[in-house]
Amino acid sequence: MRRLLPLVSFIAVCMTLTALSASAQTPVITTHPAHDTVCARTSAMFTVAATHSPSIFIWEVSRDAGTSWDTVFNGGLYSGANNDTLMVFGADTLSGRMYKVTVGNDSGFATSNSAMLTVTPILSAGTISGSAGICLGGMVTYTSSGATGGSWSIFDTTVATIDASGMVMTRTAGIDTVYYTVSNSCGSATARRAIHIDTNVTAASITGPTSVCVRSFITLGMTISGGTWSASNGNATVTSLGVVTGVNYGMDTISYSFSNACGSFTRTRTVTIDTVVSIAGIAGPSAVCVGSWVNYTSSTTGGTWVSGDASIANVDASGNVTGRNQGMTMISYNITNACGTASANDTIWVSRRAAAILGRDSLGIAITSTYTDSAINGTWSSSDTTVARVNATTGTVTTVAAGTFTLNYSVTNVCGTTTATKVVTVGAAPSAGTITGGDSVCVGATIRLSSTVTGGTWSIANAKASINDTGLVTGLVGPELDTVYYTVTNGFGTTVLAKEIYVNTLPVITITPIATINLGTAYTLVATPTGGTWISTQPTKVVFISSSTFVVMQRGVVDLIYTKSNTCGTSRDTFTVNVPVINAVNGIAQNEFQAVVAPNPNQGAFNLSVASAHQEAAQITVLNAVGSVVASFNTTTNTNKEVSLDLAAGVYIMQINTAHGNTVAKFEVAK
């Protein structure tokens, strides 16, 4: 913008004054723009206030400390150029410029004082220069390309320290970070540089295999990390991790080079690159006798001899194989290099002479028994087949009659022909006699068993009972079955007798309850185990009309006792009948009856009186002992009724029913 702008501004003001109509008063500035200081890349704000509502705002800027002024327009670094507030973006180039404003209305104009903009720059810490590595005990001074006057610091002062000039003094080996920080009112900036403090290293040797197969790999090691691996020629390659791969048959030198701020070293290792080996076959006998030896050979030298099972045959470094035990094993000749192991193999059978025959030297008649010998593939024979026969292959002997025979076992193999013999006597097995004694015992009780033949042993099948060596049986768990054995043995066999024993217990009674019991009704009791007997402790109140069926004749509490016996004793259990008694008035309760039969027993003729609180009709039903109706008739309560019935001898029950209730009476017919 050129210096003509003030003239343009003046012309614009004049034109504005011509266009405005007359106003009451000229604006008076009450608040002038104030100096403002801002950080670079933030906005400054200049504000004016005036009286009489000015409608025109013309902002101007001076680049030469107020000597000349240019009009400010919206756009770029400015906004609000036609308002009471001018916003200026804080570019570094605007620092030191001055701003003022002319305000006006239709009556006139007023110009403010000028205000200065100061822009504080944002500092840069730049880039730190200096060595990345320092040897322990040394020092290095670091510099920065950023603003001057900053401060130096270090992350871990246990590793190194730094002074105000940027000089680092080492304290211990490790990794650290150097910082350079510059600050002003607009903030701070920090530059960083990682450093490492090294120590003097003592060169170590390369570790790992010294050979590798073509197209295979090995891994070499070095106790000091951070170095570089290399190979001297094309026979092998090596990676940064020390992995060596064989390429061509021959040799190569693998190097490990290391350097740090304190110095450097290089170590080497010669590696042989091998190819897959080949081996010729081995030759030697296919069999050897226990205790003898044979020799194996191979046309390929440099290998080692190995036995697959040294307990069967052992082989020494010269290929001499010694038989140790009967069986088959493999003899191997192995050659090994970095490419692996090549083997030639052959099997050898170790034979032995016939040894002692294993088996019984006495047998019973008409039994079988199998004999064995540690030498295999032999043939069995009997010297007397009228006493015993033998299977030539399996050695199973079948006895025929009493007597003595010689059992022969002949073996022909690399050891020659050898024969083992055993004299066997055949006789009759013993008699165990007959077991006598009881066949049941109670838990906790004992019985004595015996046999007509002495000298045997007693045993029992399970833990339901026990038996001692004299035949005393003790019951343990019941009710259960167990089996007793009596065993007699002699040189010709064993005979076993068996006898079943029942282990019993006292009866355990269970009575099935009856939920509701009414006066005059017949009920049947169920109890287990069955076969016991029931009795009533008060027969006038509760009467049994059969072995387990009862009728309540009178109200009250009566115990019915069930008794069951077995060989271990007698058990009892009780069933209680409870028909509650109703309190009576004048001896006869409401809805209650008293029946009297006289005489009782009788021959079918008797007097019946039913006492009641009510005078009313009563229906009489007569039941026999099995509950069948045998007669019926009517009467009236509180009167005497003469009854004559044609009944067989026995016990009978009368059911007495009225409109107000019912009762029962028992009578007996005796003829």
Image: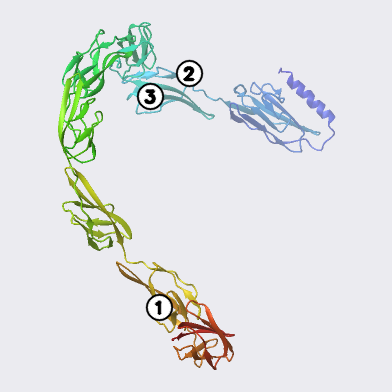
- Amino acid bearing label 2: Ser
> Reading the chain from its start, which is encountered first: label 1 or label 3?
3
First in sequence: mark 1 vs mark 2: 2
Please name the colour scheme applied to the rendered image. Answer: rainbow
Q: Secondary structure at mark 2?
A: loop
- Residue 518 versus residue 9 in the image, above or below: below
Spatial distance from mark 1 to mark 3, Cα to Cα? Answer: 101 Å
Q: Are marks 2 and 3 in contact (CB under 8 Å)?
A: no
Disc 1 crowd rating (10 Å Cα; few below 14, some 14-19, many 20+) is some
| Quadrant assignment, res 129 | top left
User: Which circle marks residue 559 in the picture?
Assistant: 1
Q: Disc 1 vs disc 3: which is toward the camera?
A: 1
Q: Residues within 10 Å of mark 3 (few under 14, many from 20)?
A: some
Depth check: give the residue in front, 582 or 139.
582
Depth check: 167 or 529 in front?
529
Which disc, if any, is residue 175?
Answer: 3
Considering every residue shown, the one lying at the far front of the view is: 386
Label annotation for residue 145: 2
Q: Quadrant of residue 27?
A: top right
- SS category of the residue bearing label 1: strand
Cα–Cα span, label 1 and label 2: 119 Å
Q: Are marks 1 and 3 in contact (CB under 8 Å)?
A: no
- Residue at horizontal 48%, vertical 89%? 597
Callout 1 amino acid:
Asp
Q: Residue at x 82, y 36 (%)?
A: 23
* Left or right: 318 in relation to 109: left
Give the image location of residue 31, x and y in percent.
68, 36
Res 422 quadrant in image: top left
Q: Give the mark toward the camera: 1 or 2.
A: 1
Whether residue 257 is situated above or below residue 329 in the rendered picture = above
Q: Along the line of sight, which residue is nearer the eye, 643 or 219?
A: 643
Quadrant assignment for the C terminus: bottom left
